[in-house]
Image (spheres, rainbow, N blue to C red):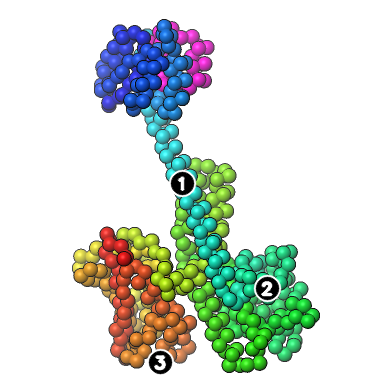
Amino acid sequence: MRLRVLIVEDSEDDARLLVKFLTKQAIDVAAQRVDTAEAMQAALEEGPWDVILSDHNMPEFSAFDALDILKNSGLDVPFIIVSGLIGEEVAVEAMKAGAHDYIMKGKLARLVPAIERELRDANVRRERRQADEALRIAYAELEKRVKERTAELEAVLASIVDGLVLYGKSGEILRMNATAERILGHAESEIHMAFVERAQSKMIETPDGKPFPPDELPTARALRGETVQGIVLVYRKAPNVAYWLSSSAGPVRGTDGTLMGAVATFVDITPLHESEQQRERLLERQQEYISLISHDLRTPLTVIQGQAQLLLRKLQQEDPNGSKQRSAESVLTSAKRMNAMIQDLVDAARLEGRQLRVEPQPLDLVSFVHDLTERLAVTLPVERIRIEAHGNLPQVMADPNKLERILVNLLSNALKYSAPHSPVTVRVTSGTNAVVTAVVDEGAGISPQELPRLFERYYRVQADRPGKEGLGLGLYITRGLVEAHGGHIWVESEVGKGSTFYFTLLPAGRLPS
């Protein structure tokens, strides 16, 4: 091996003997001798050095002086004392001062093993410092992103005209906007109550003046997993202050289907409750908010959660049960809660302005589809799905989270709107400037009159699909996600023969404009 050695020695002969000894051990030595503080300082600045071999006593210098200079330089270089005369007490003091080992000049057989050991230890220390710095940077970036997402959530909530409340699993209030605060008027002590307990302390009536059972309120039902829309109730904030409210609520679930809480909106229909027509218009607004908040909240969590999990795993290995781990766990918990609640709010709000953020990375599209269908086996009849790859396919640039949402929307529609045992084909081909994915079903097809409006917000195909109407947001969001990747989406369909949905993605190396 090649070894860069700084020798702190007043005797040129002894320095040559050290170099000669190391050379005989098959070591390619590049050495420099110094014997004063000034010379050592200059040598350290000119470095780098793999190891420092120092005599103990010299006329104008000593090993302790050399150690002080090394410490002040901030360098981490193995320092081994090689001396002919050094007592045990002095050796111990030298080790306490920072020396890594000491060897008698008459017993140089230990020198090479000592050097090899200290080089390994120095490398471990260097890697640990690099890992610590990487963790510090990752943690700082994670904190920054959490703060950014929190600010975005607060801004979105503040911009919603109607009352909006986000509830935890037990019905405790996690977030509510200014309108909800004004209408509900909850005291600080009520915020952390379970929902039913809080509702029992309020005067809430049905439109005909009867007490509204707390367990049947929209939020209580949503906390049991139901989706409820447009329930009219009378909320008596005070004996002479009553709000007529149209309330909708839906459950918020994790990626594994676990109920995480609920989201509810409150439209103040006090001036309009006698007008059915105006009431219906408000219900449409109500549906809009519920759609934006509840639709697709079961998608995987954002990059914050992923980074937090990665950081937590690293800390569990390097600092188990330490304060950093507890901080990371706190960040992860907050990220899970926040990300699940803001995802659809932010995505749907930004689609119109083409401000949706994607984080594309190179990936193998065919492998991605195979992996996705395996993970969907619990919720979808994926045995009906056939995957075909044609030609020499390059990798594509795509955000894995957003691409999964695109494919899940298209595949679930194809499976839902075709015969139970008919195949659904995912066909991937390479186009001129893009990779084209087609999702083909053998369903009832879509009429030519409906095709132009298929990707509009809230538009739903009604014909021949009884009982399968959706909110009309799936294809609207899918189009926005595809376009955010710099791609295009379109459909070809013939009534009675089925439909084919196409979308394109850019090949790896190209980014959306």
Mark 2 falls on what kind of element? helix
Specify which label sits upstream in the sequence, 3 or 1: 1
Of residues 167 and 277, the one nearer the viewer is 277
The label shown at residue 137 is 1
Which circle, 2 or 3, is nearer the viewer?
A: 2
Q: The C terminus appears in which quarter of the rendering?
A: bottom left
In the image, residue 117 sits, relative to residue 224, either above or below, namely above
Of residues 480 and 471, the one nearer the viewer is 480
Q: Could you say where residue 5 lies in the image, as x and y percent from the top left?
A: 33, 21
User: Is disc 3 surrounded by few (<14), some (14 to 19) or many (20+) residues within 10 Å?
Assistant: few
Of residues 386 and 335, the one nearer the viewer is 335
Q: Could you say where residue 373 lies in the image, as x and y percent from the top left?
A: 37, 69
Specify which label sits upstream in the sequence, 2 or 3: 2
Mark 1 falls on what kind of element? helix
Between the C-alphas of marks 2 and 3, the distance is: 45 Å
Tell me which amino acid carries mark 2: Arg
Q: Which residue bears the numbered disc 3?
A: 464
Tell me which amino acid carries mark 3: Asp
Residue 318 sits inside the magenta stretch: no
Q: Are marks 3 and 1 in contact (CB under 8 Å)?
A: no
Measuring 39% from the left and 64% from the top, which residue is drawn there?
358
Q: Is residue 73 left or right of residue 513?
A: right
Q: In this view, does 422 lie to the left or right of 328?
A: left
The label shown at residue 182 is 2
Query: Magenta region: which residues?
Result: 79-105
Q: Could you say where residue 237 lies in the image, as x and y percent from the top left?
A: 74, 77
Between the C-alphas of marks 3 and 1, the distance is: 56 Å
